[in-house]
Image (cartoon, grey):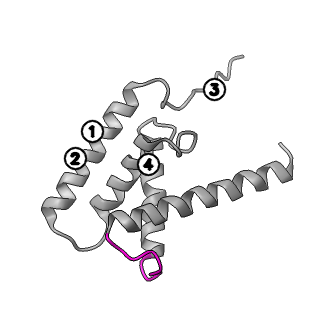
Amino acid sequence: MTDKEIEELQMKEIEIKTDLKDLAKECLSIVNTSTLKDKEILMFLNAGIEDMKRLGIDANKNIKNSLVQAGVIMFIKANFGMVDIKEKQLAQKTYEMICNNLSLSSEYQIEEVDNNA
């Protein structure tokens, strides 16, 4: 992979995460022009993607998929700010249910590389 291809992939990743950040703000009822909580939202966005990876779900490859996006948004809602505990618990349960369903489908699983080949 050339440096230019790597740079293009990084730019696409930034664009996708910006779109997800905007979606997360909308789902959290935060005005899109507000930037006060952007770092916290991005932290939880990245943490949600990493948590899905930990569970064997290839979130980066499928980041444009609405199920993966819904999972990341539910992760953010379960961890963000000081909101009603019942809402956080519901978001956590929803996140876990989405991840359980995604992990059952080979389409979303991280492909293991055979090192013996």
The amino acid type, in three-letter code, at marker 1 is Met
- Residue that label 2 marks: 93
Q: Quadrant of the C terminus?
A: top right
Q: How crowded is mark 1: few (under 14 residues within 10 Å), some or many (20 or more)?
A: few
Q: Which residue is drawn at 32% across and 39% down?
A: 98
| Mark 4 or 1, closer to the camera | 4
C-alpha span from label 2 to label 3: 31 Å
- Tags 1 and 3 in contact by the CB under 8 Å rule? no
Q: Specify whether 3 is left or right of 111.
A: right
Q: Which residue is drawn at 24% across and 53% down?
A: 91
- Residue that label 4 marks: 69
| Mark 2 or 3, closer to the camera | 2
User: Main SS of the magenta segment?
Assistant: loop
- Residue that label 1 marks: 97
- Tags 2 and 1 in contact by the CB under 8 Å rule? yes
- Residue that label 3 marks: 113
- Establish if 78 lies above or below 32: above
Q: Which of marks 4 and 1 is nearer the N terminus?
A: 4
